[in-house]
Image: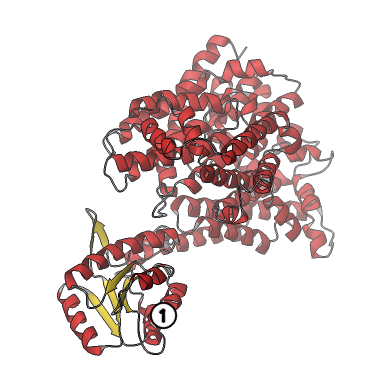
């Protein structure tokens, strides 16, 4: 909104209206009547002049005569919508036939009115059109920054916050252009044979040969010197180059994290910016930068969004909702029964797939209960439903090795040190954490939201059952989609190692298309900005680790800890603190790969149980609640959390950051006191 604000559902402020009519006396009379009622009114007599006004003055509502000499109303409408798709058109005509109303409807007209029209009725439609313009701006992701003062301009709106953009760019330049600290240069200059345990801070460094340094390994792997012409460099030069690249990558990571957390730029644009900076600062060769972005997890996110479109299109989401939300007849039942069940399920099934199936159902339930309560919108309810689902699915990760790649990475790290942990042992140490943490998270949302909800009776299952009854019996397409979903789940369980996560989902999309259930236009309408975001997060994690940046950050963190946190249960706690923080900015697998090889050998050197420290590190990598880049769960939920009718983004990046920060603290508290200092001690994990 520019000069208008919403108060109690009514728009306040000066509405900007443009009158377009070739009859001058009509324009003059209507302009006076609207100005008396507080509107800022512009008027022109031709379509060509209207287009110029729209380009430079940005009216909110246009009252447009359909029949004009030269460029008529329909032609003018098309040109205006191409320039400002959010502007709302009220079409007037002296020939108010139903057929003409139908024709104008093809061109996104807000309202068709016969001319002459009653002024009070026109004003009602103008106000409704101003409200619809706000929704249209949300659908088209158009920021509207207030320019009433310098402070208002700097504050901006979601998607464009000039003050944060300027400050963040200056911070990035400070990080990127100043010399790297000596500690970073000395770290990347160390050879593997000198401190083998320390040098393996990133799993890929395990491929280094004795005598290699991180700097020389990075230059060899990145091929940036060959890209420049193959100049020879000394060990000292290699260390300095790698340290500079590591520092730049930390700067890019900080820049991206701030933009994603604050919403200062659109999600997709920030993803492109991070990619551009990697090119500009020559972090890898252009081909390798492209490869770093194109990971299996990116295909997985794309596949999940496409599959969700198919499930919703066929109506199968309603059937799934009946199964998953069978007990959700009230707020306490939803939070304290459904959420722990979802978390435990996420310990053994793909939490990403569960979120992809559940979120559309929750949005369906949201629409049903708001309609039943006679409420247009209850954003607090949408935020609670989506975030509690997302966060409880996240904390299913510690429950078993099957919960995600991060756990497989930690099992591999422990195996490198001759420590074998079985599936049953992992479940014994991890599963008791999951329902307790889920209940704690549910309790937070219960007390934080119960008085904020406009919908007082949260009977999700009844509303979903009503929606299911509307579509009748299952169709052939639903049965086919259900069979393909079952095949997908089987593939994920049995062929996950061979095909990864993305392969089975892409296979499902192809099969759905072959049966005519899914068309390309359905896939084309998924939120590609979220796909771009996750591609960028994958590349950031890889490059920060490869340059030695993540190892340096980890060492700085651990060296700053007091003695209690450098051994025993204290080391497990400190490892989980670092892992839980980093996982909000990198993928969980990359976090464990970067931190695990540091914390596990530290445990061995300090006579602490490496299993305790390793599991604490892996468990906390599931706490990616604050940022949507931390896990596909968050990205998928964010992409789907839009009002189906208006297109408004109901759950924002700020919601993730605000509530995710609190849930992160809750997750740590449960891990520290219930798990590390609680039943782990009773089980004797530190022996």
Residue 198 location in percent, x, y? 71, 35
**Furthest residue in direction left, as rendered:** 36
Identity of the residue drawn at 49% across and 33% down = 319
Identity of the residue drawn at 74% across and 33% down = 497
Looking at this view, is 139 or 319 the one in front? 319
Q: Quadrant of residue 241?
A: bottom right
Circle 1 sits on which residue? 76
Q: Specify how the rendered protein is coloured.
A: secondary structure
Residue 258 visible in image: yes
Looking at this view, is 130 or 636 the one in front? 130
**Image position of 71 with respect to 569: above or below:** below
**Image position of 630 with respect to 70: above or below:** above
Residue 519 location in percent, x, y? 61, 53
The answer to whether 598 appears left or right of 585 in the picture is right
Q: Residues within 10 Å of mark 1 (few under 14, many from 20)?
A: many
The quarter of the image holding the C terminus is top right
Residue 625 visible in image: no
Please tell me whether mark 1 sits on a helix, a strand or a loop. helix
Q: Quadrant of residue 685?
A: top right
**Image position of 153 with respect to 374: above or below:** below
The quarter of the image holding the N terminus is bottom left
Looking at this view, is 429 or 348 the one in front? 348
């Amino acid at each position: 909104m520019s000069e208008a604000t919403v108060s109690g559902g009514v728009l306040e402020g000066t509405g900007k209206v443009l009158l377009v009519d070739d009859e001058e006396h009509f324009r003059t009379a209507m302009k006076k009547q609207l100005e008396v009622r507080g509107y800022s009114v512009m008027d022109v007599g031709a379509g060509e002049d209207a287009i110029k006004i729209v380009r430079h003055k940005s009216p909110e509502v246009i009252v447009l005569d359909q029949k004009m000499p030269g460029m008529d109303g329909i032609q003018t409408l098309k040109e205006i919508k191409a320039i400002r798709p959010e502007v709302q058109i009220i079409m007037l005509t002296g020939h108010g036939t139903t057929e003409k109303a139908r024709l104008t409807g093809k061109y996104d007209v807000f309202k068709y009115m016969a001319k002459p029209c009653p002024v009070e009725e026109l004003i009602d439609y103008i106000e409704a059109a101003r409200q619809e313009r706000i929704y249209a701006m949300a659908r088209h992701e158009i920021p509207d920054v207030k320019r009433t003062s310098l402070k208002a301009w700097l504050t901006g709106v979601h998607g464009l916050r000039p003050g944060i953009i300027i400050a963040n760019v200056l911070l990035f330049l400070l990080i990127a252009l100043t010399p790297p600290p000596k500690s970073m240069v000395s770290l990347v200059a160390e050879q593997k044979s000198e401190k083998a345990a320390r040098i393996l801070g990133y799993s890929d460094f395990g491929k280094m040969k004795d005598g290699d340094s991180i700097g020389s390994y990075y230059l060899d792997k990145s091929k940036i010197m060959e890209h420049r012409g193959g100049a020879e460099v000394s060990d000292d030069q290699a260390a300095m180059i790698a340290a500079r690249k590591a520092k730049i990558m930390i700067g890019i990571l900080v820049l991206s994290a701030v933009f994603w957390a604050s919403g200062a730029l659109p999600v997709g644009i920030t993803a492109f910016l991070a990619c551009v900076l990697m090119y500009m600062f020559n972090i890898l060769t252009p081909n390798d930068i492209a490869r770093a972005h194109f990971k299996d997890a990116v295909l997985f996110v794309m596949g999940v969004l496409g599959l969700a479109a198919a499930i919703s299109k066929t109506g199968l989401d309603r059937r799934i909702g009946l199964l998953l939300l069978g007990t959700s007849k009230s707020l306490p039942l939803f939070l304290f029964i459904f959420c722990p069940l979802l978390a435990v399920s996420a310990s053994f099934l793909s939490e990403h797939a569960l979120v992809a199936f559940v979120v559309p159902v929750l949005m369906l339930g949201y629409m049903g209960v708001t309609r039943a309560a006679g409420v247009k919108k209850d954003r607090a309810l949408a935020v609670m439903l989506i975030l509690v689902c997302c966060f409880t699915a996240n904390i299913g990760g510690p429950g078993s090795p099957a919960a995600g790649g991060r756990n497989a990475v930690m099992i591999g790290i422990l195996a490198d040190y001759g420590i074998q942990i079985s599936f049953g042992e992992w479940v014994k140490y991890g599963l008791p954490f999951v329902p307790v943490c889920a209940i704690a998270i549910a309790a937070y949302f219960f007390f934080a939201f119960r008085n904020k909800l406009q919908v007082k009776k949260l009977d999700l299952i009844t509303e979903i059952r009503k929606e299911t009854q509307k579509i009748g019996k299952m169709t052939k397409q639903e049965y086919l989609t259900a069979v393909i979903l079952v095949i997908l789940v089987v593939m994920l369980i049995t062929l996950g190692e061979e095909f990864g996560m993305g392969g089975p989902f892409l296979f499902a999309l192809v099969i759905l298309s072959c049966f005519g259930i899914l068309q390309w236009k359905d896939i084309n309408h998924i939120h590609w900005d979220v796909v771009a975001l996750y591609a960028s997060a994958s590349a950031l994690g890889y490059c920060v680790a490869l340059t030695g940046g993540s190892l340096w950050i980890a060492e700085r963190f651990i060296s700053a800890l007091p003695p209690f946190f450098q051994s025993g249960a204290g080391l497990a706690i400190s490892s989980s603190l670092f892992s839980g923080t980093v996982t909000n900015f990198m993928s969980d697998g990359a976090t464990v790969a970067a931190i695990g090889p540091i914390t596990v050998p530290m445990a061995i050197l300090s006579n602490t149980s490496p299993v305790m420290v390793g599991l604490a590190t892996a468990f906390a990598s599931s706490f990616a609640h604050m940022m949507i880049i931390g896990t596909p769960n968050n990205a998928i939920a964010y992409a789907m959390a839009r009002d189906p009718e208006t297109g408004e983004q109901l759950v924002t990046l700020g919601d993730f950051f605000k509530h995710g920060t609190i849930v992160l603290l809750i997750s740590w508290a449960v891990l520290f006191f219930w798990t590390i200092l609680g039943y782990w001690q009773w089980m004797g994990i530190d022996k």
